[in-house]
Image (cartoon, rainbow, N blue to C red):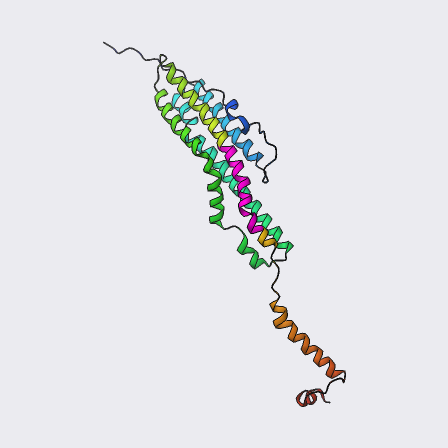
Amino acid sequence: MKPPLKLLMPLRIPELAPSLGRIIVPRRLFDPWVPLDDIREELATRVLELGGEGRAAAARVAREAVLEVTGRSPWAAAWEHAVRRAGARVADALDAEITRTARQVRLSRRRLRRHLLTNAEKRAIAARLGTGGATFVAALDALETAAGRVADASVLEKDVHAEWQEALRTVARRLEAAWLALEAEVDEERGRWTPEIDALAAWRPSLWPIFVVWTPLALLLIWLGLILGGYLPAPAWLAAQLGF
């Protein structure tokens, strides 16, 4: 006797835009000190593209492709790309502010290079910006589990399909939370570097070269001027040199 034919549940991608919330429509009192809107818009666009690619695959009844384009890897790649871009943007802005401050106090280029961010510091900034993504990663874990269950779900397992759809919406909501945490961390990052920039702005050149080099030289020139003017007698060795 043949086993009963199993009809698989068609996969339908839910609308993700409402779950993205403030990634699509930001609501803030003040703009970040570093412009991030282009990165935010790119992230939102990529997520909506994932939904569109998933629906196109569903229309072709390409079940594996649907789960692949809406799975963990594309979501994680979109988030990591946004974090890297934001980290680079913050690092460049800090370097620019340090450079402007150094020029105002006439700091030498050699000294300026000591104050610019190192590669390790730039990587640390990106890592701190990504710390708000913990709940997003947890949501990706749940999505991965739900995708494994819905992969061979039948038309009778509507709850499994609904669970997978809700997992997708949850990932989008957690991505919104991760982005808002990133924006907050960007503001914190400026405060973290403010003391160093303020210390640089308060820098003044050392006066010891003036006293050690220029003061004796000035006294020597004054002494020679008085001798040449006839106000002081010239030493014998100098008189011989000058023909006095």
Q: Nearer the viewer, residue 31 or 43?
A: 31
Q: Nearer the viewer, residue 72 or 54?
A: 72
Inspect the magenta stretch and tell me whether residue 243 lies in it.
no
Residue 225, how many percent across, how many down? 73, 80
Q: Residue at x 66, y 89 (%)?
A: 237
Inspect the magenta stretch and tell me whether residue 184 lies in it.
yes
Asked where in the image residue 224 lies, by quadrant, the reply is: bottom right
Q: On screen, 214 above or below 36? A: below
Asked where in the image residue 149 lies, by quadrant, the reply is: top left
Q: Residue at x 55, y 40 (%)?
A: 187
For the C terminus, the quadrant is: bottom right
Q: Nearer the viewer, residue 184 or 24?
A: 184
Q: Main secondary structure of the magenta part?
A: helix
Q: Which residues are magenta?
A: 178-197
For the N terminus, the quadrant is: top left
Q: On screen, 242 above or below 169? A: below
Q: Nearer the viewer, residue 172 or 28?
A: 28
